[in-house]
Amino acid sequence: MNKRKKQELRFAVCINNEGYEASLEMEKLYRVIPDDEAAKYGYVRVVDESGEDYGYSVKRFYPIEIPSELEKALMAANTA
C-alpha cells in the first residue's frame, strides 16, 4: 500500500490563470512540487508552461488525486 503524507499533493488543475495567461493554462493538469515553506504562505509550487517550477496562490488550483498507475506514468514522462 502506498503510504503518502495526507498533505502531499502531486497534481492540481488550474482554475484561475488571471494575470498569468502565458504561464498557466485553464483546466490543465499541473505537477506539484512539495514545498512546505510555500504552503505556509498559501502558495503551491507547480511546473508551469515555462517548464520551471514557480509558486502560485493555492487559490489558482484545484487539487486532485489520480490513480496510482496514472501517477506513475505521468511522473515517468516528466523525468524522460
Image: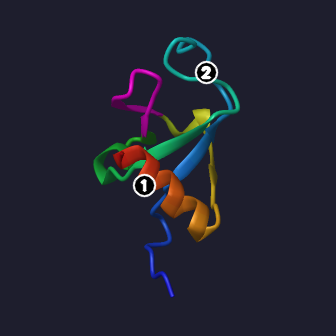
Residue 49 at what x, y percent from top left? Answer: 47, 23
Residue nearest the viewer, comparing 22 with 41: 22
User: In which quadrant will I find the C terminus?
Assistant: top left
Name the residue: 38% across, 41% down: 41
Name the residue: 48% across, 81% down: 2
Residue that badge 2 annotates: 17
Instruction: Check disc 2 and give the amino acid type.
Output: Asn
| Residue mark closest to the camera, 1 vs 2 | 1
Query: In what element is the residue under mark 1?
Result: helix
Residue that badge 1 annotates: 76
Residue 67 sits above or below residue 31 on the image: below
Residue 71: say if magenta.
no
Along the polypeptide, which appears first: circle 1 or circle 2? 2
Instruction: Check disc 1 and give the amino acid type.
Output: Ala
Q: So how many labels did they put on this image? A: 2
Q: Quadrant of residue 38?
A: top left
Question: Which span is picked out in magenta?
Answer: 46-56
Mark 2 surroundings within 10 Å by alpha-carbon count, few (fewer than 14), some (14 through 19), many (20 or more) = some
Mark 1 surroundings within 10 Å by alpha-carbon count, few (fewer than 14), some (14 through 19), many (20 or more) = few
Residue nearest the viewer, comparing 71 with 11: 71
Residue 40 appears in the figure: no
